[in-house]
């Protein structure tokens, strides 16, 4: 079998690349080990986690209403239905992707692809799958490597117990454990911790560094850390898990740190300490592709690897490991293969933590500015001054712009608060378009909305914000 373009991996990077390559007139095949298209994001990541987070959000909002004189009974959770709704969403979307592939005449090959050389994949039959392909050779003119990533599970935590799970196991949600330990205070741990906490588990988070969401702007993390402290059973910062032992109904966890050095029992342990790129075990060494010391495939801005026939995109091609970055890189690879002068040159790749409150940022961060000695003005608008935030009962937020003091161009934006993940899109556009603070301040935003905080923060920079009074120096 031969195809002009072969995409290895059918996640958000892979299918975006395959579909665009087909739209650009190329003959395309996707090789995917899972019977469904969608990859981590759709099957075990973004979408199922957001389906569960939506349920969690409605529960916590209903509870918050008690303060406003409206009380509901505690929720009765039918875990099979909660899980069922999430599984239906996955089935609808992955079914839709299959149909879109067929409509574009993209050949779906359900098999494990293993490189024989720079122009050939061996199609290995997949365990338990109804593969129609097995031990067959597939040659190509170009291959787009989109093999993604898997949960990091170091040996000392991988004790082979069904009570110790990765995000895959947590999303499968067989039940709601009475107590859950989340190892790792990154976005996946906090999102899943939020889900289980709202569904009734007593959730404790252990984080090695001295703050949640290491690397994120502390001003943004603060309101989230406060709410998590109120709603979770415990947050142990600067603590490490040194060992796990399945003791029948529970897992005995050895924890070491300034507040606690002991063994504690939990019903379930979620290990969420990062993700590993999938760059081993499928013959990459038989090509000219180079992999760096962290396991990421090295690419240039056109997504070309050091093998002239092979491109790489998405999680396997480096940070940030996010679905929209994978899709954007996939589209670049498809365009370059189709002969277009395309390159990945995004100024702002947004990142969103879908906790409660949400945290979102785009472009330059305060940490990066500090680290790289980039001079910036920082203009912050606290949500206590927003009528809409007050009306929502959620003033635990802020919107900040990082502004170039010389040109007044916006370089970065950070938002924490209800719906921050939706609000950040405006900042992405502004940064990409090279807007300055005047452009944003003079664009009329609808009242009363949280989107106004984006404009008001730019007015803070100009010293003209209506709701913020700053007496002028004499
Ligand atoms: P993947 O989606 O990982 O897909 C790779 C595919 O390649 C897989 O389907 C795999 O089966 C296949 N494959 C691998 N090797 C082979 C082989 N040899 N042969 C055949 N097939 C192979 N990102 C966001 O942007 N927003 C979010 O809200 C978000 N939430 C997340 C929540 C969780 C719990 C997790 C785990 C991740 C989340 N992510 C989120 C990250 C997002 O899922 C990834 O960044 C994204 O899926 C990467 O896409 P990809 O195409 O590079 O690879």
Image (cartoon, rainbow, N blue to C red):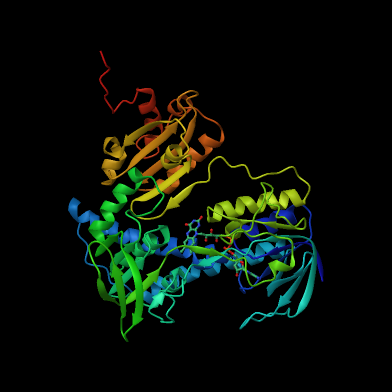
Q: Nearer the viewer, residue 399 or 135?
A: 135
Residue at the (25%, 57%) spot, across then down: 229
Q: Residue furthest bottom?
A: 248
Please say if 473 is above or below 457.
above
Determine if residue 380 is in view.
Answer: yes
Can you say which quadrant of the picture contains the C terminus? top left
Can you say which quadrant of the picture contains the N terminus? bottom right
- What x and y, as percent, mark residue 146? 64, 61
Residue at the (71%, 62%) spot, across then down: 103
The image quadrant in which ligand 1 is located: bottom right
Q: Nearer the viewer, residue 450 or 411?
A: 411
- What x and y, as percent, mark residue 99? 66, 65
Q: Nearer the viewer, residue 442 or 334?
A: 334
Q: Is residue 326 left or right of residue 302?
A: left
Please say if 213 is above or below 204.
above
- What x and y, as percent, mark residue 249? 31, 84
Instruction: Count the labels in the image.
Output: 0
Residue at the (37%, 55%) spot, across then down: 355
Q: Residue furthest top?
A: 474
Quadrant position of residue 166: bottom left
Q: Is residue 457 left or right of residue 10?
A: left
- What x and y, as percent, mark residue 160? 44, 82
Residue at the (32%, 70%) spot, across then down: 181
Please say if 213 is above or below 49.
above
Please say if 376 is above or below 174.
above
Determine if residue 110 is in view.
Answer: no
Quadrant position of residue 467: top left
């Amino acid at each position: 079998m031969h195809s002009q373009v072969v995409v290895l991996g059918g996640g958000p990077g892979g299918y975006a690349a395959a579909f665009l390559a087909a739209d650009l007139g190329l003959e395309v095949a996707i090789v995917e080990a899972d019977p469904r298209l969608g990859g981590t994001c759709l099957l075990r990541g973004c979408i199922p986690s957001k389906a569960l987070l939506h349920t969690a959000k409605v529960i916590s909002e209903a509870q918050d209403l008690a303060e406003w004189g409206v009380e509901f009974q505690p929720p009765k959770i039918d875990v099979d239905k909660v899980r069922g709704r999430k599984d239906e969403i996955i089935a609808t979307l992955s079914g839709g992707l299959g149909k879109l592939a067929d409509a574009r005449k993209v050949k779906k090959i359900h098999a494990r692809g293993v490189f024989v050389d720079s122009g050939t994949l061996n199609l290995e039959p997949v365990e338990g799958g109804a593969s129609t392909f097995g031990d067959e050779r597939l040659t190509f003119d170009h291959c787009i490597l989109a093999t993604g990533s898997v949960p990091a599970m170091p040996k000392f935590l991988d004790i082979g117990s069904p009570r110790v799970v990765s995000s895959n196991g947590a999303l499968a949600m067989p039940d709601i454990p009475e107590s859950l330990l989340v190892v790792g205070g990154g976005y996946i741990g906090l999102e899943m911790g939020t889900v289980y906490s709202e569904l009734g588990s007593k959730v404790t988070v252990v984080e090695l560094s001295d703050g949640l969401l290491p690397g994120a702007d502390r001003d943004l993390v603060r309101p989230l850390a406060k709410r998590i402290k109120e709603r979770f059973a415990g947050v142990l910062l600067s603590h490490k898990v040194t060992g796990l032992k399945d003791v029948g109904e529970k897992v005995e966890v050895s924890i070491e740190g300034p507040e606690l050095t002991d063994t504690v029992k939990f019903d379930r342990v979620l290990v969420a300490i990062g993700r590993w790129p999938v760059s081993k075990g499928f013959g990459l060494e038989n090509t000219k592709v180079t992999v760096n010391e962290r396991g990421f495939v090295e690419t240039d801005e056109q997504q070309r690897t050091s093998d002239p026939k092979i491109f790489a995109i998405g999680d396997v091609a480096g940070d940030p490991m996010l679905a929209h970055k994978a899709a954007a890189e996939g589209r670049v690879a498809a365009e370059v293969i189709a002969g277009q002068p395309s390159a990945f040159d995004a100024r702002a790749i947004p990142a969103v933590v879908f906790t409660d409150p949400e945290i979102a940022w785009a472009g330059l961060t305060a940490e990066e500015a500090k680290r790289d000695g980039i001079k910036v003005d920082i203009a912050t608008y606290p949500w206590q001054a927003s009528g809409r935030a007050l009306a929502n009962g959620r003033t635990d937020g802020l919107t900040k712009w990082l502004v170039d003091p010389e040109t007044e161009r916006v370089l970065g934006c950070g938002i924490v608060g209800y719906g921050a993940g939706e609000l950040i899109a405006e900042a992405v556009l502004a940064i990409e378009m090279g807007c300055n603070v005047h452009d944003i301040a003079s664009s009329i935003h609808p009242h009363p909305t949280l989107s106004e905080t984006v404009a008001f923060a730019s007015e803070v920079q100009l010293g003209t914000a209506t709701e913020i009074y700053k007496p002028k120096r004499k």
